[in-house]
Amino acid sequence: MSQDWNIKARSTACGACQKAFEDGQAYITRLAFEGIDYTRDDYCEPCWVAEAARKERYSSWKGIFKVPPPEPERRVRKETAESLLRELLEENNPARKNAIYILAVMLERQRVMVEREVRAGDAGERLVVYEHRKTGETFVLVDPKLKLTEIDPVQQEIMDLLGGRAAEALPIATLLAGSPSAAAVSTPDEAPTSP
Ligand SMILES: [Zn+2]
């Protein structure tokens, strides 16, 4: 697998009528999966009515468009879990897949990202779709199905990568406990229990 994760930015305009989204406007995001790759389109509500039927294998959800924070504000946050996650995704190194996943779980617990969807990939892998709450970007990650005993080394790896910001990495075990993803982390063979 050459690339098993991806970041896609939110569009600033509807994919059908091309009208720019306004601050506070509802929109629908569709991820259409094609093999290991996927495409992302964002639509205004009126256009979605027609678009919904056009693809077969997709995930969709409704969001509220917010004007993204200006670049300088985002750049201030250096060497945080978020910047590290972005760096690792850019590197595209499969050896970092455990760290990438744990960072995403951390960011979900910190309410930076929200889990939008979990779906089975073509090879039966567990794909988790996260959305960045502020920028609206989607992050599609493969759940490495870590066992509890494998978390410590990953925690150490993240602490090393964060360097001086190790404090941020410390509560990983706490962050994972009670996380919706914790069941998959600790007992990958068990199906999630339905409410
Ligand atoms: Zn439209």
Image (cartoon, rainbow, N blue to C red):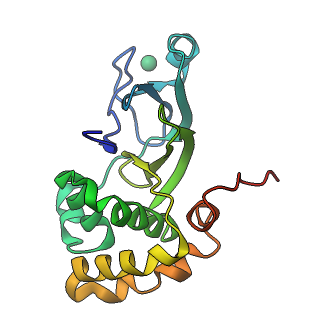
Residue 101 percent coordinates (x, y): 41, 60
Q: Quarter of the image holding residue 152?
A: bottom left
Is residue 65 shown above or below 94?
above
In the shown orientation, is residue 4 left or right of residue 83? right
Q: Tell me which image quadrant ligand 1 sits in.
A: top left
Q: Nearer the viewer, residue 66 or 121?
A: 121
Q: From the image, which quarter does the N terminus lie in? A: top left
Q: Quarter of the image holding residue 49?
A: top right
Is residue 106 shown above or below 141?
below
Q: Nearer the viewer, residue 100 or 152?
A: 152
Residue 150 percent coordinates (x, y): 45, 74
Residue visible at 54% across and 10% down in the picture? 50
Residue visible at 21% across and 54% down in the picture? 93
Residue visible at 32% across and 33% down in the picture? 12
Count of all numbered marks drawn on residues in the image:
0
Residue 114 percent coordinates (x, y): 51, 55
Q: Quarter of the image holding residue 45?
A: top right
Residue visible at 48% across and 24% down in the picture? 44
In the shown orientation, is residue 103 left or right of residue 70? right
In the shown orientation, is residue 96 left or right of residue 134? left
Q: Nearer the viewer, residue 152 or 20?
A: 152
Is residue 52 shown above or below 164?
above
The residue furthest right is: 195
Residue 23 percent coordinates (x, y): 41, 42
